Image: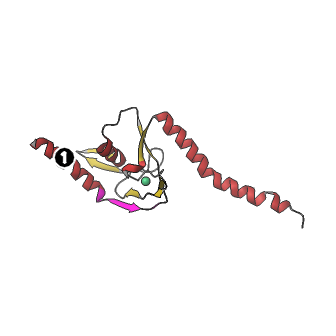
Amino acid sequence: MKSIQMKMDRKQSIIDKIFARVEIKDLGFILNGVISPCHIWTGPTSGEGKGGGYGRMCLDGQTVAVHLVIYTHYNGYIPSKKHIDHLCNNRLCCNELHLEMVTPKQNQKRRITRTREKNYVPIYNQLRCDGPISDAPN
Ligand SMILES: [Zn+2]
């Protein structure tokens, strides 16, 4: 009984440690029709480039990804073949409601869709500038 209590305290202290370095920000992410603020990690990150931009922390002398610690805390064990996807597309976010376990295939598919969505705006602007309006007779 006592050891379970100690384990719980330890788990809670990890979460407290994370929340001490988190900023709650409304970044416009909408979940089930309501604005759901992101929990932005303000501590160290995995740097820039591929695989970069994720929150990192030190736990028992090991460097771990903050969002994975949060996910595990609320949902338990993550099978090694699964990925944790940020529904809000913000790698520094560790709001447990914004994290979802997916297969690598699903994760890749989502990434492609999001990249397309990101590209959509400039293409649209370009069409609007060079489109029929400029060709209209005066
Ligand atoms: Zn988020």
- Please indicate whether residue 123 sits to the left or right of residue 94 in the image: right
Foreground residue, 96 or 116? 96
Q: Which residue is drawn at the image coordinates 46% and 48% (left, top)?
A: 87
Residue 134 x %, y %:
82, 62
Foreground residue, 92 or 136? 136
Does 130 appear in magenta?
Answer: no
Residue 4 x %, y %:
15, 42
Q: Secondary structure at mark 1?
A: helix
Q: Which residues are magenta?
A: 19-27
- Farthest residue to the bottom: give it: 138
Q: Residues within 10 Å of mark 1 (few under 14, many from 20)?
A: few
Q: Which residue is drawn at the image coordinates 26% and 55% (left, top)?
A: 17
Q: Amino acid at mark 1?
A: Met
- In the image, is residue 26 above or below residue 59? below
- Residue picked out by circle 1: 8
Does 20 appear in magenta?
Answer: yes
